[in-house]
Image (cartoon, rainbow, N blue to C red):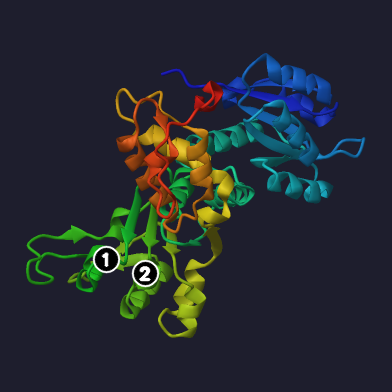
Amino acid sequence: MTRKIWQVLMFHPQHAVLDNVLANGEAEGYQLSRVTNPMDCLNTLDQQVWDLLLVPACLEDGSEAADIIALVRRHGYDGSIAVLSELPHATQVSRALQVGATDYLLIPFGHTHLGQLVQRIMQTSQSCSSMVAKAPQSKQLLQLAQRVAQTDASVLINGESGTGKEVLASFIHNASPRSQAPFVAINCAAIPETMIESILFGHAKGAFTGASSAQPGKLEIANGGTLLLDEIAELPLGLQTKLLRVLQEKEVERLGSHQKINLDIRVLAATNQDLEKAVAEGRFRADLYYRLNVFPLCCASLRDRTEDIIPLAKHLLKRHMMLGQESTHFTDSAKRALTAYTWPGNVRELENIIQRALVMSHGCLIRAQDLMLPGQPLVTEPESTPLMSWLP
């Protein structure tokens, strides 16, 4: 199978240390072209599809990467952007990352360094298929997730039920160097307390009544990969102590066995509760909390990121369309209704509404009444919708 050669456009004024990356890129998975001024950059962006745009942290006229990013986005470029920076320009890089840059690269660098950047962004882009981020806070969350994915740091994901915490955890795994290893998720609230220990740690044959054969636990199954402990606040205190010991010693014993199994796992945890409050109330161990909360991320509620609602609705619509429904679209009134609703159930509720609307819709349009949103009046009269509003 022929691998994809990424098309990379570098906009940077003449800089001697960059000359050595103009050749030999294909061996690293990219083909590099270069322009030296903003107008040539915009014109070149129009000529073909570019996978990655490299921009300088700052220019001699006082403009910086954040300004360049805003310019190319207005021009219609929606691909990945990385910033080329020297050490004194950390402030400009930070601002660029806040407005949508994917990564950065310090000057001087060689073609292998650029190749590593391209591979990292390519892996991240491939894992973004399940992520929709149009609201500013969603973009910032995705950028933070991309950064922490490259490390083995423990991540604690907080957010209301249905905000997509497991989707974010899966994104972190897929964007990480462990992406080819297992991703194992366990919902601590959905398992009877009497079974959690066996499911987490596994058991030996005869460890308890009914244990007719040895079984690996989730920790062992996730070895080499990533373990997500969803609803971690529901884990009983006794098991919190045992889990902390396993994470600290990086080894586990199956129930009924004294054989130690070495572990190499990356741990992600998620909760819809305030763990600091749970620690203060004695419901959650402080040492486990600090062990998990190395890098905190927060999934905002859908009502606080309204810019994501319509893109998410379109994404979910495509996911649940059946044969013959490929041309189905939302009318303007449906979009207004979706945006006006408060979404107490967040993305999970939105997905249910979209599935219901596909059942209720007639023809290729989903109207406001097809959504059947709670508290919103049913509109029964036909609505006149311009043809352009049917387009995705």
Q: Quadrant of residue 370?
A: top left
Query: In the picture, which quadrant includes the N terminus?
Result: top left
Q: Which residue lies under the disc numbered 2? A: 246
Q: Residue at x 55, y 51 (%)?
A: 145
**Residue 325: image location, x then y, percent:** 34, 26
- Pointer 1 or 2: first along the chain: 1
**Residue 343: image location, x then y, percent:** 46, 54
- Residue extending furthest toward the front: 381
Q: Residue at x 36, y 75 (%)?
A: 240
Q: Is residue 101 visible?
A: yes
Q: Is residue 290 left or right of residue 143?
A: left
Q: Which residue lies under the disc numbered 1? A: 201
Q: Residue at x 32, y 42 (%)?
A: 356
Q: Amino acid at mark 1?
A: Phe
Tags 1 and 2 in contact by the CB under 8 Å rule? Answer: yes
- Quick one: SS at disc 2? helix
Q: In the rendered image of this protein, does residue 364 appear above or below residue 307?
A: above
Q: Is residue 181 left or right of residue 150?
A: left
Q: In the rendered image of this protein, does residue 199 appear above or below residue 182?
A: below
- Residue extending furthest toward the right: 61
The disc placed on residue 274 is: none
- Quick one: SS at disc 1? helix
Q: Would you call the spot at circle 2 few (<14 residues within 10 Å), some (14-19), or many (20 or more)?
A: some
Q: Is residue 36 visible?
A: no
**Residue 237: image location, x then y, percent:** 35, 79
Q: Quadrant of residue 103?
A: top right
Q: Is residue 195 left or right of residue 118?
A: left
Q: In the rendered image of this protein, does residue 117 appear above or below residue 98?
A: above
Q: Residue at x 24, y 63 (%)?
A: 199
Q: Would you call the spot at circle 1 few (<14 residues within 10 Å), some (14-19), or many (20 or more)?
A: many
Q: Amino acid at mark 2?
A: Val
